[in-house]
Each structure stands twice: as structure tokens, then as C-alpha cells.
Amino acid sequence: MSTTKQFNFNHLSVKDLVDARDMFHVHLINKRNVVATAIGRYLIRHSDIDSHGKFIDREKGQGSKMNSKQRDERTLSNSMVIDISWPCILVFVKHWETEEDLIKRGASDIVPKTIYMPDGRVVPICTVVAPKVSLEKEKIDINKIRFPEGLMGGGFPLLIQSQGITKVASAGCIVTDGHTYYALTNRHVAGEAGQEIKTLFGSKETCIGKSSGNSIGKIPFNDLYKGWESNNQLVSCDTGLIEISNVNEWKTEILDIPRMDEMFEINTLNLSLGIIAEHSKANGVITDSISGNVVARGAVSGVLKGEILGLFYRYKTVGGAEYVSEFLIAGRNGKDLEVHHGDSGSVWLLESKDEDDHDLLQPIALHWGQHAFLQNASDKLGYAYSLSSCLSSICRELDVELVRGWNIDLDYSWGESGHYTIGNRAVFALNRKKYPKLYRLMKNNADNISYDDAAIKQQDYNKSTDNFTPLVDVPDTVFKARVSGISRFPYENPNHYADVDLTRESDGKSLLELSKKKENLTVEFWQAFYDETDHTEMKERGLLPFRVKQIFMEMVNYLKNNDTVGFVAAAGVLGHYIGDGCQPLHGSKITNGDGRPETEGVHSAYETKMIDKNRVEIVDSLNDRITAQHASKKKFNKIPSIGSPDEAAQACINLLDVTMTQITPQQINDTYYDAVVSDSKAAGVKALWEAYGDKTIDTLARGSRYLAKYWEAAWELGKGETKTAIKTTKIAQGILKERYEDKEKFLKSYSLDTIHEYFDSNS
């Protein structure tokens, strides 16, 4: 007789399952074949689901061919939760054995199909074959891990020295107790109070904080879930807090995760089995889960995509106490989760919807360990499953709150796809007939300057074995990095922009309009202008054209001194600032919003997210666009001559002018505002591309041409084409890296009020 015909189990709550499992767990776990238990929803064999996703109840006579046969074993790979799956206790066993075989041994090891409670409740059991296998600790190659370049955040690696061994783990997210900010990770990672926690910035090991000593290990189940009795159960929370040394070096977003919404709150009043992953079958194909999907970013594994398989997984018994993991997370749709050692401390985010059906990513759990199960009896290698603790329980016990929205619109590497594209295409834009030697030199060093087309399209921005940063992004990832010995903070930042749309009260003229006259393009004039407009702080006094002038002068000097390394290094780095100059918002006072709250974040929406999302079309279009601009007679596409350092600065003003005329900063803000108000920030990114995508390709092509022109002009002044001492071979990355990490001798960063020191000594 069908089990579902006898009883309707759908009324069972999580508490009912907790009660039943607690009452009979000792009985179950002492069956010689049982290895673990959890609570969840009944796993239906794929063979018991027809091609339209309907359950075939074979005990009712459907599918009579199997009635006389012993049922096949149920495994994690041949079964799944579907819409009719009822609440149950999951019992994991080492082997599938028939009732006949068990009866022959006395029947004491038979796992019952149901549990009958003294108060009349009846709870079903789902038995699944999932023998555990040991996980060998892999040797982690830190050269293959992405370390922070500018800002630190969740998903980046932590390095911990313990007993002479360097261990790798993951930063989870940022929390606060109202006074101090902490990085959340595992207790076994953070260690004892005062333990230094490090990471790599560039190639330098840097302390990012110390263990606060505030941590939690195992907590009685009854203390976490008041009113739910469960004897001798200890929940593994395994959470520690790292007191952050410098909050300015961190952001709250998790690396490679598009956003982080409010935490998914779990307590005894709202916890339901609705967060268990549920699949369906259509036309014979199993679809992705419609619920219970989670995503994380591990330091070793990168982005992890999983689904919640079960709750309160009892995995171990020690001295009469049962150890419990609040979440058991599998890979999606039967795939291996591929979580590794070194991912400990990662935060899982639940993919959900708000009341308006907008997508949400809500932090829900903290990964602290993994188990591996064989999927089938014939398997030799196990699939990994995450053991994770509930984030809301953790925050409550540690008395901390999750922090969101801190540096949220600063990217870890600001607009890298745009910068890499310009650096990549500048080589193509060179006049190879007039400057064949320059072309050979830059072509041979193209991989040192930027990434190739394939890498940009795939965003495969993995660093080399010595963590070399391509030259075009050195200003963001090295110069801005807060790393002792190489940091140029705070002087570097204002070198990337200039608010040339500022107007002065005396005549209503903008800095851009005034600077078109060469007599006004001086440090002294800009200082006076900023003073008049009450922009007196260093960060308010952008100096992009003067940074370009400085680097141009250094390129010429390197050539005159037969320094090929210096020229290539400076030429590549210049690409970043020219990239800034051909982005409309780097020349504007409304760079990250015009005062309306909805426009906040427009900078990264346009310069990073929009370009990243459409990078393939951009890369595929640029060569033709560069060729067309070369042939064009339009004023927009004419590049002024550059025959001196002053003309190098003037050309930068011209680039800003053309860029901000073709796409005005106010247009970008207005378009973004309209889309965000009517829909969402994601819609804002889409609207920006629809409105300005083609023009943005124009600006990137123009930026590539300007960069090539700067290279040619410096080459001409330095007589590079005729210098036999200047070689065209590829330069070793280690040599270039040593050069760009010298903050005093290589392209020293100045503020507007100190850069006269350079010009005075190099006049």
C-alpha cells in the first residue's frame, strides 16, 4: 500500500522532524549501516518521475513491471526533491541492503520507513545510500589564487601562520559590534586572540588584522533554537572575528558576487523546508532548482554554486554528544560542489525574490567544513558537500550586525575591462610604417601592458606566478593599494580625475573651458581656480592632465637615457590615465551621482558593470572603429599634435572635452536615474548601454588612438627609432614589477599642490 495513501505528511513542521529525529536518533545511528541523519524533504528516484515531472507511485500499480522486483537503491545522484516531496528524516547509509538480507541477520538493522511518535505524530524516513569518504588535504598553490590588488573584501584569501605552516582560508564578510569592524571567518582560522591574519597585496605579505578572541565553537542546540528540545546535540558554529586594522582597505561586497542584500533571518518561528532545493522534470530533462539555490566565493575555488539538501545534519558522535551542522549544501543539479580546503570562512548567499519579484542575494550561512559522499556504489571519488552554520544565529550569539553598503561602489580594480581594452588596442592603433621599431617593441610587450582579446572576453585576469599586474592597471591595483612599501595613498587618487565641469562664480566659466587656453593650463591657475570654488582638500583637486604631462616627460627621459624598461613601464602605465580621460565621469563633479539618491553608484554602473557586461561586443568592434576614426575628418576624431610636455597636457584636456561632449555626465546620471526609479539598478546598467553603448565604443577607440599618439610623440622626441641601445625584445615581468613598485623613483605620485616639485626639477 502506498505510504502517501496512508498518511499525508505535508503538515509536518521542522519542529516535528526535529522532535522525531531526536527521539529515535540513538536507535537509528546504532544500525550498523547508518552513517548520518538530517531533516529535509523526501528524495524521489528519477525513475519514479515520468517525462512530464509527475510522480509514479509504483506501489499503487503504476509501472507494474517493477512491482515484483526489489526496489533499486536510492542514491544522491539518482534521486531529487520535487514538488510532491514530503517532509522526512534523511538517513544516510553505507550500503543498500534488501529487507530479506537484513531479516536473515535478525532484522535489527532494518531502517524503518516511518517513526511513530507517542503523541500520534507519524514521521517518514527516507533512506539514501551515501557512504562517506575521507577528504585528503590538497596542497594549495597560492600562485593560482586571486589576492587583493586595491581593496580587501569577502572571498579573498587569508594567510595564517600556525606551528610553522602557512594555512589558507577565506574572508567571509564584514560585521560590527557598533564600535569596531571585523572580518567574519571560522574560529579555526582566526585562532587565539592576537593572532595576526595576513594576505598578499601585490607580492608583499601584509597584516590585515588580528584575531579578536571573540569566537564561538559548538553551542547546545537548545540554546540556539529555544523551545525545540534536542538532547545531547551540539551545533557547530565555528566562527571567529578578525579585528580589521584599516577599514579604508576594505569593502563590504563579496568578490565576484554582484551584490549582497539583507541577511536571511532564521529562527524557530520562520524556519521552513521551503529553503530546501526543489527540482522538476520537463521533457525528460531535470531542471535547475527553483528554490534553495545558494552562491558563495571561496578563496581557493572561486565562485561556488550550491543548493540546500538538508538541515541539522548530524555527522559525528563524540563522548555521547552529537555534532550537528545546520546546513548540508550540495552542488547544483547533481553536480560536484567542488569546495576545497582553503574555502573555509566563505559566506553562502541565498538566491531569493522580494515582494516585487526582484532578485535578492541574502547571506544565510558560513561554510566551515566539508564532507564527501560517494554518489553511486561504483564511484571511487566522492562529491564534496558543504557543512555550514546559520549566519543569523552566529550574529545573534556574537552580538554583531552584518555591514553592507560600505565602499560598495568602489570596485576592487576600478573598470579593469575598459582599461585593459584601451591598453590592448593602442598597439593596433600605432603607425607601424612610420615607427616600425616602436611597433615591434610594444607588440612584443603587449602581454606586459594588457591582456589579449580572449582574456578580456572571458575576464580571465589571472596574475602570473609572481603576481605581476599588467602595466595598464598598475595605477589602480598597485599605486592605490594600501600596502606598506609600495602604497602611494593618498597622493595617487586625485591623479585619476579632474572635475573640469566645475564653474567659478566670478564669470560662470568652467575649468574645462578656461583650460583650453594654454596660458591657463598651469598648476598655479588650477590651484587658484580650485581655491575660488572652495575645493581645498587634496581629494577635491584632481590633476589628471598634469599627471599625463609628468609621465610623458618621463617617457622621453627614459629614451634619452637608453632605458627601455623605464619607457615600456611608463608607456603602459600611461594607458591607465588615458583610459580615465576617455571616460566621461572622470572629468565631472557628478562622478558618482548628481545628488539624487538613486544616482549613487552610477560610476561603477557605467564604467565597470556596463563595460564588463558588453565586453565581447566592445572588443569585437574596436579595430573597425579605430580604422574608421583614423579615416574620419570629423573634429571629434582629430587628435592634436603633441610636440612638447605642455602639448601633452593640452591633448588630455582635448580628450576630456571631446569625451564629455559626446556623452555628458548629466545624461549618464539622468538615464541611470530613470531606469533605477522605474525598475532596478540592473535595469540602470542595461539602459546605459542601450543609450550610450555605441558612443562608448567610440570613446574607447579614441582613447586607444590617443594613447598610441602619446607613445609616438614621446618616441619621436626621445629619438627612439634611431637609438641602437633601445632594444625591442620582450622584457621579463619581474624586472617591470620591480620598477613599478618603486614609489619614489618610478612616476612618483604628487598632489596638485606638490607636483610643482617635479616640474621645477625637470624644467
Image (spheres, rainbow, N blue to C red):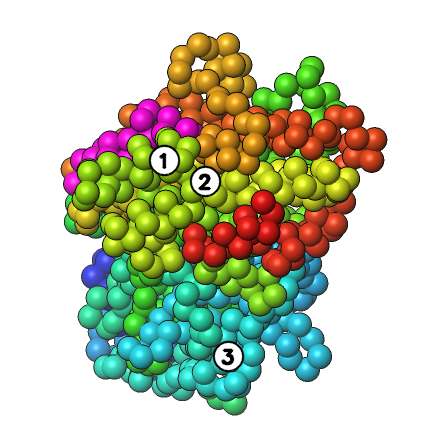
Going by the image, does 726 lie left or right of 430? Answer: right
Q: Are marks 3 and 2 in contact (CB under 8 Å)?
A: no
Disc nearer the start of the sequence (3/1)? 3
Q: Which mark is residue 515?
A: 1
Q: Residue, x 73% and y 21% (percent of image)?
A: 436
Disc nearer the start of the sequence (2/1)? 1
Give the residue number, with chain letter if any, for mark 3.
210
Question: Mainly helix, strand or loop, the magenta region?
Answer: helix
- Residue 254 x, y percent position in the rendering: 42, 57
Give the residue number, with chain letter if any, for mark 2.
545
Q: Are marks 2 and 1 in contact (CB under 8 Å)?
A: yes
Disc nearer the start of the sequence (3/2)? 3
- Residue 110 x, y percent position in the rendering: 48, 69
The residue segment tinted magenta is: 653-677
**Number of numbered markers:** 3
Q: Is residue 511 above or below residue 189?
A: above
Instruction: In this rendered view, identify the residue nearer to me: 19 or 749.
Output: 749
Crowding at dot 2, Cα within 10 Å, few <14 / some 14-19 / many 20+, comes out as many
